[in-house]
Amino acid sequence: MSEAHQEFGAPGGLFRRLRDAAGRDWTGYTWHPFVQRVSDGTLPLLSFRHYLIQDYLFLIHFARAKALAVVKGESLAAMREKAAAVLAILDETKLHLKYCAEWGLSEAEVVKVPETAETVSYTRWVLDRGLSGDILDLEIALAPCTVGYGEVALRILADPARKVEGNAYQSWIDTYADEGYQAMARAAAARIDALGESHGGEARFARLSADFAEAARLEQRFWQQGLDAG
Ligand SMILES: Cc1ncc(C[n+]2csc(CCO)c2C)c(N)n1
């Protein structure tokens, strides 16, 4: 599927407009060389290991940012949904700990690893967008993360260079290719479309678009730190 990215958000909706406006920043994130090397199985294990440990630390702070969406939720239904999403993020860390256990690293050891500048800058930026803005500002800062990984998985599945047999990263790919995850990513894009309608997305497009592209660049740097560690 060469048009993998067309999966998320409705035509003409806020999500697709933001993604299209982000252009190369978005493609540079969802088809970063790190992702390509996960797909063809050539990513050095040291790169993956660095990435995964930092991603574990990332998820802790990302869960805090998602918890802000409970605080800023505008209905009981929204608050329940966000509270469930916080738990889902904390669950995602189990995949990370499974890998770490295979490398002989315990949770106690992983949490002692210092956060890199890439991890701090991305997570604290998301928290700041949530603290200083409204629910739409927060969701725009969060969405590239959730929806982007959905697109990353679709791009890998469609990649002619993909290594299926004996790919060391297959269980990581499976996590995001999973239909449950894909449905969540589609729902996140649909929510951006709906918030765009209800919260003046059109009038706020310049700022939202700058934030969306910033998140995509922060994601690129997050992959890059893994490559640099290999
Ligand atoms: C750097 C980085 N960006 C995105 C994700 C993906 N992700 C983060 S939280 C979550 C659950 C749903 O929101 C998902 C899928 C990641 N793990 N690491």
Image (cartoon, rainbow, N blue to C red):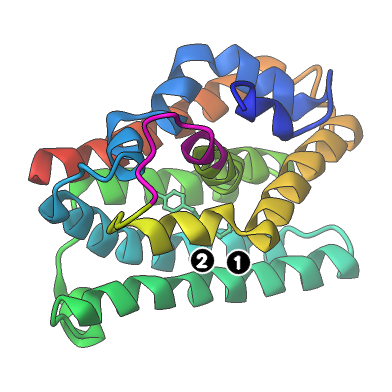
Q: Nearer the viewer, residue 21 or 8?
A: 8
What is the x, y in percent for residue 151?
Answer: 57, 38
Q: Position of residue 215 (x, y in %)?
A: 47, 34
Specify whether tag 1 is near ligand 1 (CB below 8 Å): no
Q: Amino acid at mark 2?
A: Ala
The type of residue carrying mark 1 is Ala
Quick one: quadrant of the C terminus?
A: top left
Tell whether label 2 touches label 1 (CB within 8 Å).
yes
Query: Is 18 inside the magenta-drawn segment?
Result: no
Q: Which stretch did the figure color magenta? A: 154-164
Which residue does the numbered mark 2 point to in the structure image?
A: 63
Indicate yes or no whether the magenta region holds residue 157: yes
In terms of secondary structure, what is the magenta stretch mainly? loop
Give the residue at mark 1: 67
Q: Is residue 202 above or below residue 117?
A: above
Q: Say which quadrant the N terminus sits in.
A: top right
Residue at 51% from the left image edge and 66% from the top image edge: 63
Is the CB of the residue bearing disc 2 within 8 angstroms of ligand 1? yes
Q: Secondary structure at mark 2?
A: helix
Image coords of residue 161 (percent x, y)? 36, 31
